[in-house]
């Protein structure tokens, strides 16, 4: 009889399907699926960026399941370059906003939330010595990029929430760290 509660990793280990590694890979897969959904209906530069990100997500998943470093500093630097380029084309809101205004922004918002979950799994796996630190940093920056892509798609048509400003909430508007 086949053992259905375990799966083989690229480390050639059998692990329980509810292990941290498998939860992490599942989060990466889910994020990539939502990135793909957004890509299907996006246009122009956003569609092109999402296509590049979607391909790189396979490297992220491979690192999770194999333990071999696939995301390196140059990948983080490349993502930071994309972030800077997009950041220069948008106006950031000064208050909390509802981001989901159409299909593209809704899918990007869900993708961002799932990427943040994948990042938390990456932190846990990094603490266990199972993935490198650059995959953690790359997922962190990907979350930022997805937020910026939502703002780009909204073209300044934000729906503000209440009177609370971002600054009042203790957040500082800063450019993404480049070092």
Image (tube, rainbow, N blue to C red):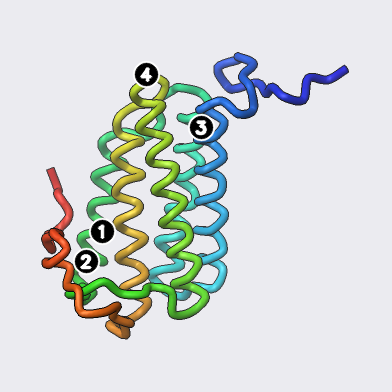
In terms of image quadrants, where is residue 133?
top left
Alpha-carbon distance for marks 3 and 4? Answer: 15 Å
Mark positioned earlier in the residue sequence (1 or 4): 1
Left or right: 14, with 144 as reference point: right
Which secondary structure lies at badge 3?
helix
- Vertical placement of residue 26 versus 162, above or below: above
- x and y percentages locating residue 87 in the rendered image: 22, 66
Nearer the camera: disc 1 or disc 4 = 4
Left or right: 79, with 176 as reference point: right
Left or right: 111, with 138 as reference point: right
Whether the residues at callouts 3 and 4 have beta carbons within 8 Å, the answer is no
Residue drawn at 48 percent across, 73 percent down: 104
Tell which of 141 and 1 is nearer to you: 1
Which secondary structure lies at badge 4?
loop
Whether the residues at callouts 2 and 1 have beta carbons within 8 Å, the answer is yes
**Residue at mark 4:** 129
Residue drawn at 35 percent across, 79 percent down: 154
Alpha-carbon distance for marks 4 and 2? Answer: 33 Å
**Residue at mark 1:** 83
**Quadrant assignment for the C terminus:** top left
Q: Residues within 10 Å of mark 4 (few under 14, many from 20)?
A: few
- Vertical placement of residue 144 versus 150, above or below: above
Whether the residues at callouts 3 and 2 have beta carbons within 8 Å, the answer is no
Q: Residues within 10 Å of mark 2 (few under 14, many from 20)?
A: some
**Residue at mark 2:** 87
Whether the residues at callouts 1 and 4 have beta carbons within 8 Å, the answer is no
Tell which of 167 and 84 is nearer to you: 167
């Amino acid at each position: 009889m086949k053992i259905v509660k375990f799966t083989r990793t690229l480390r050639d280990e059998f692990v329980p399907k509810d292990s941290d590694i498998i939860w992490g890979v599942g989060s990466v897969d889910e994020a990539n699926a939502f990135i793909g959904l957004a890509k299907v209906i996006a246009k122009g530069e956003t569609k092109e960026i999402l296509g590049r990100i979607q391909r790189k997500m396979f490297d992220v998943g491979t690192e999770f399941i194999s333990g071999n470093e696939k995301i390196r500093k140059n990948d983080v630097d490349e993502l930071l370059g994309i972030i800077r380029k997009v950041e220069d084309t948008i106006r950031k809101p000064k208050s909390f906003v509802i981001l989901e205004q159409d299909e593209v922004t809704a899918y990007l918002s869900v993708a961002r939330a799932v990427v943040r979950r994948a990042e938390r799994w990456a932190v846990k796996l990094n603490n266990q010595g199972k993935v490198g630190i650059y995959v953690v940093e790359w997922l962190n920056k990907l979350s930022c990029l997805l937020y910026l892509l939502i703002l780009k798609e909204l073209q300044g048509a934000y729906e503000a929430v209440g009177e609370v400003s971002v600054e009042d909430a203790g957040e500082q508007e800063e450019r993404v760290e480049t070092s």
